[in-house]
Image (cartoon, rainbow, N blue to C red):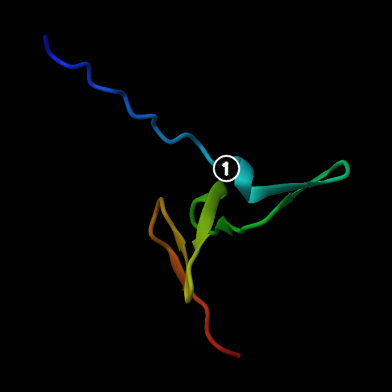
Amino acid sequence: MAKKKEHKKKPGSHKYKHYEVAGNELKRKQKFCPKCGVGVFMAKHKDRETCGQCGYTEFIGKK
């Protein structure tokens, strides 16, 4: 008899991590992509911010 293969849990949406609730207001922790618009967040890296959908990149320079 063959062994049953365990199903791995698929990762779900983690967009709730990009928001913060303060009283009755909802604040965004990250900014949106200027090309894709509202709803597509920019990923924060060490030296840049990148859009995962279109590939738009903003480099963070030292001031």
Q: Residue at x 57, y 42 (%)?
A: 15
Residue at the far left in the pictured view = 1
Estimate the x, y position of residue 49 in percent, counting from the top left: 49, 67
In the figure, 24 relative to 6: above or below?
A: below
Q: Nearer the viewer, residue 14 or 37?
A: 14
Q: Nearer the viewer, residue 18 or 36?
A: 18
Residue at the far top in the pictured view = 1
Quarter of the view holding residue 25: top right
For disc 1, the marked residue is 15
Q: Residues within 10 Å of mark 1 (few under 14, many from 20)?
A: few
- On-image quarter of the N terminus: top left
Residue at the far right in the pictured view = 23
In the figure, 52 relative to 44: above or below?
A: above
Estimate the x, y position of residue 16 in percent, counting from the top left: 62, 41
In the figure, 43 relative to 19: above or below?
A: below
In the figure, 32 relative to 9: above or below?
A: below
- Amino acid type of disc 1? Lys
Q: Is residue 46 left or right of residue 23?
A: left
Q: Nearer the viewer, residue 7 or 4?
A: 4
Estimate the x, y position of residue 24 in percent, counting from the top left: 87, 41
The secondary element bearing badge 1 is classed as helix
Residue at the far bottom in the pictured view = 63
Q: How many labels, in total?
A: 1
Q: Residue at x 55, y 88 (%)?
A: 62
- On-image quarter of the C terminus: bottom right
Quarter of the view holding residue 57: bottom left
Q: Residue at x 62, y 49 (%)?
A: 18
Q: Is residue 4 left or right of residue 19?
A: left
Estimate the x, y position of residue 26 in percent, counting from the top left: 77, 45
